[in-house]
Image (cartoon, rainbow, N blue to C red):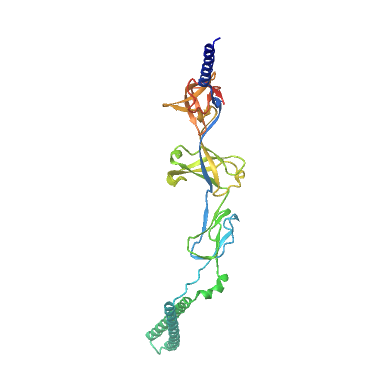
């Protein structure tokens, strides 16, 4: 064999090997994918949102009038009995300090009141003397009238004078009583706070009782001090009378109706709690989210339906996770939501038949954030691709990852 022929054979073999290598590299291989079988099972569609527990009726213990509240000895969590347990004691407040001008005016008023009293006492003394004279004169004329020494008219005039002097004495005594009280009032206006410090313990206090049976929730004013009327001292409520407040987006709230079942989770216990929607409040409010976006929210009130003993450790203001069930089914043909993708206005999946991905249009029903109900398009037991991705196309060979 000549050198030329040998070279042709060697170069031919090299070209053939390169062609085979390129063909092997370009040959289509099955794409590895995640597969799942279409199956039936329970499906629940719910709105999940954080909520907070609250006592249905929280009572505020406040000051009925302005006064000095003694130090509150009650602590949050203390048991209370309605109309028996004293929450706080209220004393009268001390008078204010007087400036020099006001004090001088008060002392002048005191002296004037004292002089008026003395004048009234003198008037009483004079009225008593005139009454005594009129009584003596009446007795004398009455004796003369019996012997017909004086006329009947003179007797009547003496009787009139006696009654007049008696009325004048009563008027003078009443005036004296007024002047005595005016003097006492003027004296009380000069009482300083320092004079009443030692009398506080003996002052009559107004006890502020617990309005309901339950526990002290919060003590807002612990230390002793002067408080104006209407100041809240403590909050009292019954921890067994709990409800849950959930604020939903207004778009979700319109889908909620009273009576829907609610599942409460993430409350700290080892089991789920049950409840139902009691009320959807007809008033929305603006709330700024953690991302700084203004959202319109609506409060939904949920009442617990389990026995009180199952959530005895819950109290006012505790965080929970509430799932409001909009729809649920026990045997639903379903797929993971990630298995579906859009094709125009329709939904589709990649079903796997003999190792080939076949695109099928499906009709979806109810869906939550993880799973979706399949109404038509595939049947139970069909194998579909869970996460199709961009590499999977209709008619492409695929293999389980």
Q: Position of residue 109 (x, y in %)?
A: 42, 79
- Measuring from the top left, give residue 47's x and y in whole percent: 50, 38
Quadrant position of the C terminus in the picture: top right
Residue 128, x across and y down, in percent = 45, 85
Numbered marks: total: 0
Mark yes or no: residue 235 visible: yes
- Image side of residue 126 versus residue 12, left or right: left
Name above or below for residue 266 compared with residue 331.
below
The residue closer to the viewer here, 82 or 166, is: 82
Quadrant where the N terminus sits is top right
Please give left or right for residue 9 compared with residue 147 in the image: right
Q: Is residue 152 above or below residue 241?
A: below
Image spot of residue 235 (x, y percent): 54, 55
Residue in the image at 61% along x and 40% along y? 271
Q: Is residue 112 above or below residue 347?
A: below
Q: Front-most of 270 and 126?
A: 270
Q: Residue furthest bottom?
A: 149
Is residue 166 in view from this perspective? Answer: no
- 159 or 69, which lies in front? 69
With respect to residue 154, does 182 lie above or below?
above
The residue at the far top in this view is 1
Outermost residue toward the front?
2
Q: Nearer the viewer, residue 330 or 154?
A: 330
């Amino acid at each position: 064999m000549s050198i030329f022929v040998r070279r042709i054979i060697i170069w031919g073999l090299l070209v053939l090997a390169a062609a085979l290598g390129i063909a092997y590299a370009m040959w289509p291989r099955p794409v590895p994918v995640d597969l799942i079988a279409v199956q039936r099972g329970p499906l629940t569609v719910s709105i999940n949102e954080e909520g907070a527990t609250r006592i249905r009726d929280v009572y505020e213990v406040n000051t009925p009038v302005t006064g000095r509240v003694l130090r509150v000895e009650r602590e949050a969590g203390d048991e209370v009995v309605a109309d028996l347990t004293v929450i706080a004691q209220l004393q009268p407040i001390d008078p204010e300090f007087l400036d020099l001008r006001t004090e001088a005016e008060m002392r002048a008023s005191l002296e004037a009141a004292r002089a008026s009293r003395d004048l009234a006492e003198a008037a009483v003394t004079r009225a008593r003397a005139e009454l005594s004279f009129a009584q003596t004169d009446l007795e004398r004329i009455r004796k003369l009238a019996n012997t017909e020494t004086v006329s009947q008219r003179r007797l009547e005039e003496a009787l009139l004078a006696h009654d007049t002097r008696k009325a004048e004495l009563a008027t003078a005594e009443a005036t004296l009583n007024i002047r005595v009280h005016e003097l006492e009032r003027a004296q009380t206006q000069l009482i300083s706070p320092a004079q009443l410090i030692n009398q506080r313990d003996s002052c009559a206090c107004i006890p502020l009782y617990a309005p309901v049976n339950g526990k002290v929730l919060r003590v807002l004013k612990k230390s002793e001090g002067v408080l104006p009327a209407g100041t809240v001292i403590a909050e009292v409520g019954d921890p067994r009378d709990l409800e849950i407040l959930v604020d939903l987006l207004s778009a979700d709230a319109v889908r909620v109706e009273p009576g829907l079942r609610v599942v409460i989770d993430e409350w700290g216990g080892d089991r789920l709690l049950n409840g139902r929607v009691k009320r959807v409040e007809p008033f929305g409010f603006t709330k700024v989210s953690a991302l700084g976006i203004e959202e319109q929210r609506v409060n939904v009130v949920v009442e617990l339906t389990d026995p009180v003993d199952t959530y005895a450790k819950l109290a006012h203001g505790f965080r929970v996770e509430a799932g409001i069930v909009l729809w649920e089914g026990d045997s639903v043909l379903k797929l993971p939501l990630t298995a579906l993708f859009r094709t125009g206005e329709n939904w589709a999946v990649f079903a796997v038949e003999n190792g080939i991905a076949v695109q099928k249009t499906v009709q979806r029903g109810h869906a939550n954030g993880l799973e979706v109900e399949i109404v038509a398009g595939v049947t139970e037991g069909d194998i579909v691709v869970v996460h199709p991705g961009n590499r999977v196309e209709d008619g492409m060979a695929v293999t389980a990852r």
